[in-house]
Image: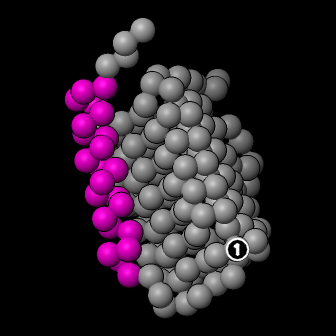
Amino acid sequence: MAIYALGDLTPTIDPTAFVHPDAVVIGNVHIGPESSIWPCAVLRGDHGAIHIGEQTSIQDGTVVHCTSTLDTVIGDRCVIGHGVHLEGCTIHDDSLIGSHAVVLHNATVGPISLVGAQALVGNNKSVPPHARALGVPAAITPNVVSIDDVQHSARIYVQNSHWYRAELKRLD
């Protein structure tokens, strides 16, 4: 695994979390129980902190960053899709961020909300609980997301993390 301290900033990774060997975790990053960080994801906690709750998946190619004034906080049981960019934002529990979506500075999502694939939640924007955000910039539809919309995907990634922890073997 590519896990790095940056000066005195050292990642804290729960022993039950899964970090794929091709992911990069740098600095002030906290990864909670049974969370998973997948190939080519980059979590860079340099000027601020990154906090990831429990049973959350950060999928392949995602970039999570922070700023000197804005930490990035991702709650419990969140699904962060492939190629997502999160920076200086808060993603509340039980939310799903679709592939290649972008959530920027001081934006908030959820709880129990969905940001669609390739959507942009810009600076200082808010996606309320149970809402769906689609498009560039994201248009918000309130009261359409249920807990079931997210929990199934979250459970699959917890199962995948246990499977990969037990059986992933490099062959070269």
Give the percent coordinates (x, y) of residue 39: 50, 34
Looking at the picture, which amino acid does disc 1 mark? Gly
Viewer-closest of 47 and 19: 19
> Of helix, strand and loop, which mostly describes the magenta segment?
helix
Q: Quadrant of residue 37?
A: top left
Task: Give coordinates of residue 152: x percent, y percent.
Answer: 31, 65
Q: Residue at x 30, y 33 (%)?
A: 164
**Vertically, is 110 above or below 159?**
below
Query: Could you say where residue 63 lies in the image, as x and y percent from the top left?
Result: 63, 44
Is 122 situated left or right of 44 in this image? right
- Magenta residues (range): 146-168
Q: Residue at x 39, y 43 (%)?
A: 36
- Of residues 74 and 113, the one nearer the viewer is 113
Residue 119 as seen in the image, left or right of residue 16: right
* Residue 134 among those drawn in magenta: no
Residue positioned 30% across, 54% down in the render: 156
Q: Is residue 1 above or below residue 150?
A: above
Of 62 and 124, which appears nearest the observer?
Answer: 62
Q: Which residue is mark 1?
A: 135
Give the image quarter of residue 100.
bottom right
